[in-house]
Amino acid sequence: MTGAQAAADAKRVAAIVTEYRYNSHAEMILGRLLGAFDYKPEVRVVSIYTDQVPEGDMSREAAARLSIPICGTIREAVLARHCPEPIDGVIIIGEHGSYPINEKGQMLYPRRRMLEETLAALDEMGLVVPIFLDKHFSYDTDDAFWMYGELKRRGIPFMGGSSIPHTDPVPPYDPRRLHSLREILVISHSTLLEGYGFHALDVLQSVAERRRGGESGVRSVQVVQGPDVWEAMDRGEWPEDLMLQALAAYPGLGPEHPRTLDPHPTLMVIDYVDGTKGYVVQFRSLVEQWGFAVRCEDGGIIAARCNSGLDRPFDHFERLTRMIERMIVTRKPPFPMERTLMSTGLVNAVVDAAYLGRKLETPELSAISYHPADEA
């Protein structure tokens, strides 16, 4: 046993990834579990499946160095017949790789297939073990609800979603103040509506669920793009003051208004069933981190930047990896899987609204209700 692996009695994990190469999510998470970035893992990776082997693949060298088998199928990785005892958890990282892109611009990552094959192998052994699934369930909302239902039916401890909601807010604030929130505006970046928009929407949902009464559903989603965003602001259709308060938490931004610096942002408008309003302003290049501002019932505003790493080794992935390990060791998810279901539905609805060019009612999301883990 090398120093890069946990002790022999550590929980055993099967890793299922699309690809493992430099700067991929697999390198940031699985790489840490294999000892990269001086990380000391709590769990022991005992099998690896990679859906693709790109130029620059890092999985084969790492597996050979640590004597971990690379399996030809997901079933083989989950069954892990070479181990004297069954696995204790599964990590699925269906992010990055060469996959088709549909007409709406969504990358068709095989996350449903990866989970479906994982569940079939677990059923074969009669196992119920914790599963982590990177980012959202699926580009298809029907598939997402199917995945959620299969996990719930089996009572599988589950964690998914973005790494960004788990970063430190700068400046810090008392989360109890979120109980009275009425409006939330999240700052995002990139031209990638799905890939980066999901991080923003997961931040939005991680804040929104803290309001008094918890989550009670989303009624509709709308997307505005380009100069129309600023025209809508001038008409008072979304809160300029929350945007400016959120941007004030970013160092180095000058006094110039963002409409001058970035004339072509994207605005996502989320109408919650209980009247709460959510907004995401996704700039092309104005900022490089996510942030948010919240208006409370008394008119007070909370604003913070999500302090994610900008360069390797991207320290926010270290926190995420620790959370994944804790979930596998304790079998207790840090937050309800309904958050990931809602964030999945939101990003898919946003993509659909942008593609169709109109506001979308979201009856499938209006029925999602839950409380944060510490209030459930």
Image: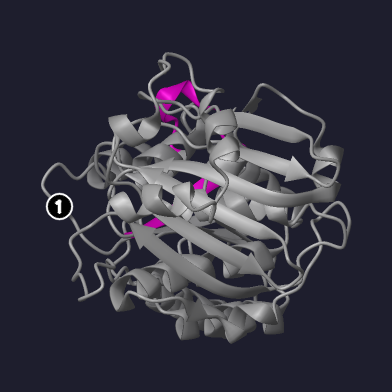
Q: Residue at x 69, y 44 (%)?
A: 326
The quadrant in which residue 64 appears is top left
Look at the picture and state if 4 lies above or below 373: above
Q: Quadrant of the C terminus?
A: bottom right
Q: Position of residue 231 (x, y in %)?
A: 38, 51
Amino acid type at circle 1 is Pro
What is the span of residues highlighted in magenta in the rendered image? 34-49
Q: Residue at x 71, y 33 (%)?
A: 302
The quadrant in which residue 96 appears is bottom left
Q: Nearer the viewer, residue 362 or 121?
A: 362
Residue lying at the far front of the rendered structure: 235
Q: Residue at x 42, y 13 (%)?
A: 252
Residue picked out by circle 1? 54
Q: Residues within 10 Å of mark 1 (few under 14, many from 20)?
A: some
Look at the picture and state if 105 lies above or below 19: below
Look at the picture and state if 215 lies above or below 205: below
Q: Residue at x 23, y 57 (%)?
A: 97
Answer left or right for 60 relative to 347. Answer: left
Answer left or right for 305 relative to 57. Answer: right
**Residue 271 covered by magenta stretch:** no
Answer left or right for 201 relative to 370. Answer: left
Q: Position of residue 77 (x, y in %)?
A: 42, 65
Q: Position of residue 113 (x, y in %)?
A: 39, 78
- Can residue 266 be seen here? The reply is yes
Of helix, strand and loop, which one carries label 1? loop
Q: Nearer the viewer, residue 255 or 55?
A: 255
**Residue 48 covered by magenta stretch:** yes
Look at the picture and state if 88 lies above or below 173: below
Q: How many marks?
A: 1
Q: Position of residue 363 (x, y in %)?
A: 60, 86
- Can residue 9 be seen here? The reply is no
